[in-house]
Amino acid sequence: MTSRSFAALALALSPALAFAQTYPAGFRQSHPLTGLSAPTQARFAHDGRIYVAEKSGRILVFDNLLDTTAERVTDLGPDVHDYHDRGLLGMDLDPHFPERPYLYVLYTHNGGLFDDAPPRWPATNCPTPPGATTQGGGCVVSGRLARLTVENGKVVATTLLVEDWYQQFPSHSIGSVRFGADGYLYAGGGDGASYNWGDWGQHGNPAWPDRRSPANQGGALRAQGMEVAEQYTDRLWLNGTIIRIDPATGAAAPGNPAAAPRGVDAQAARIVAYGLRNPFRFTIRPGTSEIWIGDVGANTWEEINVIPAVGADAQLYNFGWPCFEGRLHNGLYAGRSLCTALYADGDSGGRTPVSPPWYTYAHTGSNAISGLAFYTGTRYPADYAGALFFADYNANRIRVIKDTDGDGLPDAPADGTAALFADGGSSLAVDLLTGPGGDLFFVNVGEGRLTRVAYHADPEQPNLAPAAAIALDAGQTYDGAPRTIAFTAANSVDADAKDTLTFAWDLDDDGAFDDGSAATASAAFTSIGDAVVRVRVDDGHGGIDIAQMTVRVRDPLIFADGFEPAPR
């Protein structure tokens, strides 16, 4: 984030000092999950369960939105460096979870990248002086992206996919991990540099030196490593980048822009964008693999940057940090050779010329963009369709950018003019997401809760949409030969806990919910390929939610003689 850490800000805005949260008319917040300890991410599974990551390294699961007692899935605490803005910050579920039982995490590792790097805690390994944020100090740590296998509610195996992200100072750590519609995994990390001065590696910690960066091109300039890839020792750092990888192996995903044309190493081949300071949160526009990044600014500007979906003519994107902040040159790095190259020819120089922000806004004090989410529901007023919400953790606000021309994309307003949606209170939002009923939810790290923002056409008779759930019935399989498959929606709940739910099924993927009306349903699946099944849950008072899942049908195995290819 910025120089104010999670812990410091949570103390500064304790509940006793908080002001009321204000929303436009008709919107009201509730807090379905509470009692959490510094939560950083939440994810809704289609079977109704909600997974929550805590900064310390714990992952919890709630059965549904009415569950008040979480079960612990795992505790990565011994491996997580939970300090200032470091910790377990990113989590996502496999798109077919829980049928494919993988949970992905991105966290600050309590150790470095080399075999002589001991754990950083206990504090004897992080001496003061020099201290965590002073020149020559900093507990140098790394970041890890891992796949966790979950069985019966517990993690039973861990696969390390990527270890990198050199971090000297305790901010600009790792951030988000998300799946695109293309089935590949995207992850981001910050520059790992100081927020107190222009840092190009001149004040490295001699106990844990930067062994890769070229001379005078460390610190924040690691975010421009792709510009001088051939000068790196061994391989590039991933600092200040967004990567796109195979979720099973961690290798660069096919089609990545740097995979072949530039002849760089396997590390660089993972990168689809660089030149970011602290892409703490990004979201993916629903139904696409388009990345919308909230890049936390330094002294003046916060940014929203966009990476188009990787396609046949994929190109690298360079968002300019630290040579640029917002749309302007950053004077702290003006004399650095990397920046001089980018400034050439009217700011069109360098290997990858800089792309300006999609939207940017100036600091009005202490600011840190901290979450983005698209609204795709139907319960909010019509002018919110396709809108982009973004949170600012330090300013304690949520703003919205609407799709004013109806083309399905939000329309960037003039810099600094995005409309206010939520103001004041103790939001401390470190993640925005959408959930049941299409409503906006946010993770409140300071007050340890998940907050829901719903719209009520009649505020005198508020009604929350139910939470639909769909799962395989007992004994059924996600992947197999043509067969009859049974499903259950029994974990669906009425969020108000007062209405009787009714069910309607679409088992043939024709868009009509006319294939069943009980809490369970079944159908024969004979066509080879993936089939989408949906259930619609109605509370009888205007509240509707839809859950869906995919099942896979394969050719039956005719011969068992080794000639049939193994299913993937």
Image (cartoon, grey):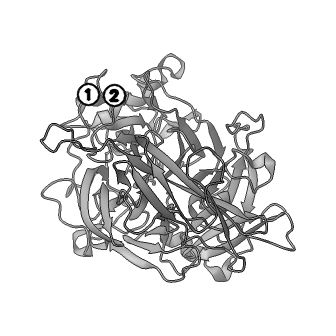
The answer to whether residue 263 of the structure is visible from this angle is yes
Q: Nearer the viewer, residue 107 or 496?
A: 496
**Residue 150 percent across, percent down from the top left:** 32, 66
Q: Which quadrant holds residue 443?
A: bottom right
Question: How many labels were placed on the picture?
Answer: 2
Q: Name the amino acid, label 2.
A: Ala
* Mark 1 or mark 2: whose residue is earlier in sequence: 2
Residue drawn at (38%, 65%) of the image = 87
Look at the numbered disc 1 and give the secondary structure of its residue. Answer: loop
From the image, tell me which residue sits under label 1: 264
The answer to whether residue 138 of the structure is visible from this angle is no
Residue drawn at (62%, 56%) of the image = 391
Q: Nearer the viewer, residue 146 or 488?
A: 488
Q: Name the amino acid, label 1.
A: Val
From the image, tell me which residue sits under label 2: 258
**Residue 424 percent across, percent down from the top left:** 72, 67
As drawn, is 183 to the left or to the right of 286?
Answer: left
**Residue 288 percent across, percent down from the top left:** 53, 39
As drawn, is 416 to the left or to the right of 341?
Answer: right
